[in-house]
């Protein structure tokens, strides 16, 4: 049997395997763009590269407006500011902390909602129960690139006359009812952070079919400037630099091949995990587009004899940096956990999922050979789970 690194064996991988290593596209194309940019001395303030990226993204996503930003958190904040929200925003707790923080940073109050056990997205029934006279918006997250129940959420927004926003940070290149995610709700926010399926080093974008919201966001992104000497409100610096747009344009050119590669990696995991007792892979609707950036495993401790946390500990020692997304849930982090209302929350599915899910290294920078090595070690761990459990207990 393979000697595990946690018990003083040699790590399976000499270098860390991260959950999502960034793509770089065609290096020389990128460098050519940077050379031209340096010659032009045009580095920011909606230069030609940012404008080209915005128009190419809008075309790819089938949406009227795409406004590039310095990151995804800023994209969320700009949307909330543009919509003049005040009061409470309903958000899932099972998401990256930036979703909740963006709401709080705008002076709004995040109200945490439970998610659906199967899709991991905000549960519209639970959401409706949280709506009251202070509710100003619903902020859904298309987790793992799987679309929220958009129709139900939109009908709630219409019924209660509140706004509907989406955090689409996971969902670039994904579809809902065969329409690209980008034009749903009042506006959607993308993150183009390096760990995402499509990236611009750091970056993000707001997408919307609403021209009025788009114009407002363009102004807010640039300190509120309407004209050279005229500012019409409290804007911020939310601009994307040209060098980031150069990376984005280059990555966009190879995006379809990164999708193909992501799917190959995902399918290989699928084959390997199918034979492993106690582990199950999250699947995506094959009739929709997904970017297959997230290989999400459910660990059933009662079947395998080891907890999700045991797996994480063992895999980390092997330099496989699997992650506990999104443990322990936003409502269990500061400042939200200190809030009395939050303590009373009973987010059963969020709790369940945050103790069982594990995200494995995947994406376009993994090779099939690496996936096989990860699969083999998972198999070996499961094969000796009783022994491992007792040894782990002795260690701790
Ligand atoms: C990455 C991410 C963000 C934040 O995006 P940044 O570009 O890093 O600011 C927000 N929400 C979710 C769900 C994310 O995964």
Image (spheres, helix red, strand yellow):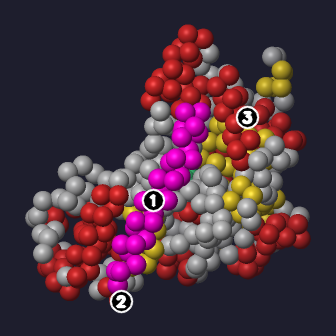
Q: Position of residue 49 (x, y in %)?
A: 64, 25
Q: State which quarter of the image contains the N terminus.
A: bottom left
Residues at badges 2 and 3 in contact (C-beta under 8 Å)? no
The residue mark sitting in front, 2 or 1, is 1
Name which of mark 2 and mark 1 comes first in the sequence: 1
Nearest the viewer among 182 and 392 is 182
> Which of the 4 image quarters holds residue 111?
bottom right
Q: Which residue is mark 2?
A: 302
Q: CA distance from mark 1 to mark 3?
A: 30 Å
Label 1's element? Answer: helix
Secondary-structure class at tag 2: helix
Vertical placement of residue 29 versus 82, above or below: above
Q: Which residues are magenta?
A: 249-277
- The residue lying at 83 percent from left, 20 percent from top is 227
Q: Identify the image quadrant of residue 387.
A: bottom left
Query: Which residue corresponds to mark 1?
Result: 264
Name the residue beneath numbered marker 3: 55
Q: Is residue 19 left or right of residue 77?
A: left
Q: Is residue 283 visible?
A: yes
Q: How many marks do you count on the picture?
A: 3
For label 1, the crowd category at 10 Å Cα-Cα, with few meaning under 14, some 14 to 19 and many 20 or more, is: some
Most foreground residue, 109 or 270: 270
Asked if residue 250 lies in the magenta stretch, the reply is yes
């Amino acid at each position: 049997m393979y000697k595990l690194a946690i018990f003083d064996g040699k790590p399976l991988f000499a270098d860390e395997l991260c959950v999502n290593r960034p793509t770089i596209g065609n290096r020389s194309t990128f460098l050519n763009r940077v050379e031209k940019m340096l010659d032009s001395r045009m580095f920011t303030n909606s230069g030609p590269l940012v404008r080209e990226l915005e128009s190419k993204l809008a075309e790819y996503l089938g949406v009227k407006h795409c406004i590039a930003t310095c990151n995804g958190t800023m994209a969320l904040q700009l949307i909330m500011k543009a919509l003049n929200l005040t009061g409470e925003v309903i958000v899932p707790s099972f998401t990256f902390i930036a979703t909740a923080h963006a709401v709080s940073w705008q002076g709004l109050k995040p109200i945490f909602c439970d998610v659906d056990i199967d899709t991991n997205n905000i549960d519209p029934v639970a959401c409706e129960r949280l709506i009251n006279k202070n509710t100003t918006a619903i902020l859904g997250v298309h987790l793992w690139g799987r679309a929220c129940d958009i129709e139900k959420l939109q009908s709630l927004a219409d019924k209660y006359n509140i706004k509907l926003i989406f955090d689409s940070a996971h969902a670039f290149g994904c579809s809902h009812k065969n329409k690209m995610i980008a034009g749903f709700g009042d506006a959607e926010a993308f993150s183009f952070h390096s760990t995402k399926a499509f990236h611009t080093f750091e970056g993000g974008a707001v997408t919307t079919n609403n021209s009025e919201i788009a114009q407002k966001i363009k102004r807010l992104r640039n300190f509120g400037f309407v004209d050279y000497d005229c500012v019409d409100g409290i804007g911020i610096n939310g601009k994307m630099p040209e060098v980031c747009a150069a990376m984005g344009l280059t990555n966009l050119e190879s995006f379809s091949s990164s999708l193909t590669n992501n799917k190959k990696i995902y399918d290989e995991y699928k084959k390997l995990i199918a034979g492993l007792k106690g582990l199950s892979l999250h699947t995506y609707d094959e009739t929709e587009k997904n970017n297959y950036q997230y290989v999400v495993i459910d660990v059933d401790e009662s079947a395998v004899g080891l907890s999700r946390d045991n797996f994480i500990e063992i895999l980390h020692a092997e330099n496989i940096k699997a992650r506990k997304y999104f443990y322990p849930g936003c409502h269990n982090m500061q400042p939200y956990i200190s809030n009395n209302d939050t303590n009373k929350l009973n987010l059963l599915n969020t709790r369940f999922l945050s103790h069982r899910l594990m995200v494995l290294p995947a994406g376009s920078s993994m090779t099939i050979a690496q996936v096989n090595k990860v699969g083999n070690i998972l198999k070996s761990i499961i094969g000796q789970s009783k022994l491992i459990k007792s040894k782990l207990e002795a260690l701790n």
